Amino acid sequence: MKVIFLGPPGAGKGTQAELACKRFGIAHISTGDILRAQLKQKTELGKQAQSYIDKGQLVPDEVIISIVEQRLRQDDCENGYLLDGFPRTLPQAEAIDGRIDLDCAVNLDAPVETLKERLCGRRVCRECGATYHISRISEGDPCAKCGGELYQRSDDKPETVENRLRVYREQTQPLIDYYDKKGILVTVDSSRDLNVVNAEIVKILGKYA
């Protein structure tokens, strides 16, 4: 099974990807997680990407494509994988076309106000990367998983969120048309309850297992 998850920031791609990968036993490839690890380790790639991420801009295609190609060569991808956050632009999709024979592209979508509320209210653990929402935690609460400090990422602040959604509409939205024309696109309303969304995704992906 080789699938990708599309959708704007805040649509729940990461959460649903983790659930789907656990359910079907495939590798979860998140370019966001890979980049954040590079940032934390202060690698050259991390420094290069930081200036783009802080402004809510996309990291250049050549950097992302290189990261993904290296990741796909790892052993855990032999039984299949789910690409979460890649491709994000039409050039990225065209660059991997022919190298990756995708089964399905799942488009997670939600109203703009829902996306803003989710993103601006998100808090992340500095240590393990676990995510929470301010509606379910109190000010000063530590991470329930490791006890680490929770903070608001720079790309989740209101002014940056606005830019992230704009960048998505301008650069990533064309991917929906691209995969729709290929006949492999399925759109899921991700504004609903997490378990309801997951059940629909499992049903969709089940035919490729």
Image (cartoon, rainbow, N blue to C red):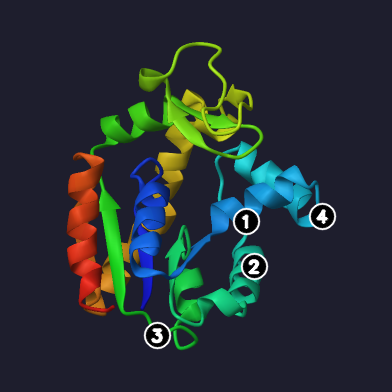
Element carrying mark 4: helix
The quadrant where residue 129 appears = top right
The Cα–Cα distance between marks 4 and 3, rounded to whole angstroms, is 31 Å
The quadrant where residue 126 appears = top right
Q: Position of residue 56 (x, y in %)?
A: 55, 40
Q: Residues within 10 Å of mark 1 (few under 14, many from 20)?
A: some
Residue closer to the observer: 147 or 38: 147
In the rendered structure, which amino acid carries the disc numbered 3? Answer: Asp
Element carrying mark 3: loop
Element carrying mark 1: helix
In the rendered structure, which amino acid carries the disc numbered 1? Answer: Ile
Tag in front: 2 or 1: 1
The residue pinned by badge 1 equals 34
Q: Position of residue 157 (x, y in %)?
A: 51, 26
Q: Position of residue 91 (x, y in %)?
A: 49, 71
The residue pinned by badge 2 equals 67
Mark 1 vs mark 4: which is more N-terminal?
Answer: 1
Mark 4 vs mark 3: which is more N-terminal?
Answer: 4
Tell me the number on the disc at residue 101.
Answer: 3
Q: Residue at x 41, y 42 (%)?
A: 166
Q: Residues within 10 Å of mark 2 (few under 14, many from 20)?
A: some
Tell me the number on the disc at residue 26.
Answer: none
Tell me the number on the disc at residue 44.
Answer: 4
The Cα–Cα distance between marks 1 and 4, rounded to whole angstroms, is 13 Å
Q: Residues within 10 Å of mark 4 (few under 14, many from 20)?
A: few
